[in-house]
Amino acid sequence: MPPLKDNSQKDNKHLLLVDDDPNLVLLVKDYLEFQGYDVTTAENGKEALEILTKEIPDMIICDVMMPEMDGYSLIEKVRQDARTSWVPVMFLSAKGQSQDRVKGLNTGADVYMVKPFEPEELVAQVESSLKQASRLMRHKGNISLDDSNRIQVPSNVELTPTETKVVQLVAQGLSNRDVAEKLSVSQRTIESHVSNMLNKTNLHNRTELARWAIENSIA
């Protein structure tokens, strides 16, 4: 698939929003996109799983109670799949009792937000979760994955020296704009290098690219 569009402000972060309330979806999607995120939406867990077969988001924001497949069932499947087990998940729910929060977090959610919520708080929680995921990825000591959990790419992938420099900086959490400034080239040039590497590796986004580089000691 073609690489996701770049947004230097948010390091090209791609969010998957899953909720069966069209009004909430419209509100949250507009607000997140205004903040600089790429947002894909799904009406229920079943539709979300279909999307996840084609692309891996940097974070999943998911309602709990939905038709077809609820949030609990979706997150259980997400956590069982090595391709998606590392993706941060935020639950959105109208149920605010402590036992509901505990169940959500025990199921595998990283954040549990109760409806109604302030959009500013949602964005703050998203940014916090993404930063935490980025820190964990960059901390090699915390990555002890067996081969079955590693990012899988074609065995004959070879990066040019420039691509290697670019992916090392991407793995450090730098945006395309920051990488361009560091290497004294245009942002468009960096976008081209990232796109080429995504095509070479058959990976879906910059997060997967960074994780692959770290796992293979490129970064």
Image: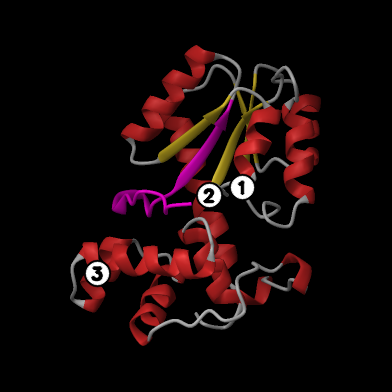
Left or right of residue 112: residue 68: right
Asked if the residue at tag 2 contacts the one at tag 1, i.e. Cβ–Cβ closer than 8 Å, the answer is: yes
Which residue occupies 46% across, 64% down?
A: 198
Residue tagged 2: 58
| Residue 88 marker | 1
Residue occupied by mark 3: 180
Which numbered tag is attached to residue 135? none
**Residue 215 at x, y = what percent?**
62, 75
Query: Relative to 160, does residue 1 appear above or below in the rendering?
Result: above
The amino acid at mark 3 is Ala
Mark 3 lies on a secondary structure that is helix
Magenta segment includes 203: no
In whole angstroms, how far apart are the C-alphas of marks 2 and 3? 22 Å
The amino acid pointed to by label 1 is: Pro
Dot 1 or dot 2, earlier in sequence: 2
x, y percent for residue 100: 77, 25
Residue 105 coordinates in the image, percent (x, y)? 74, 38
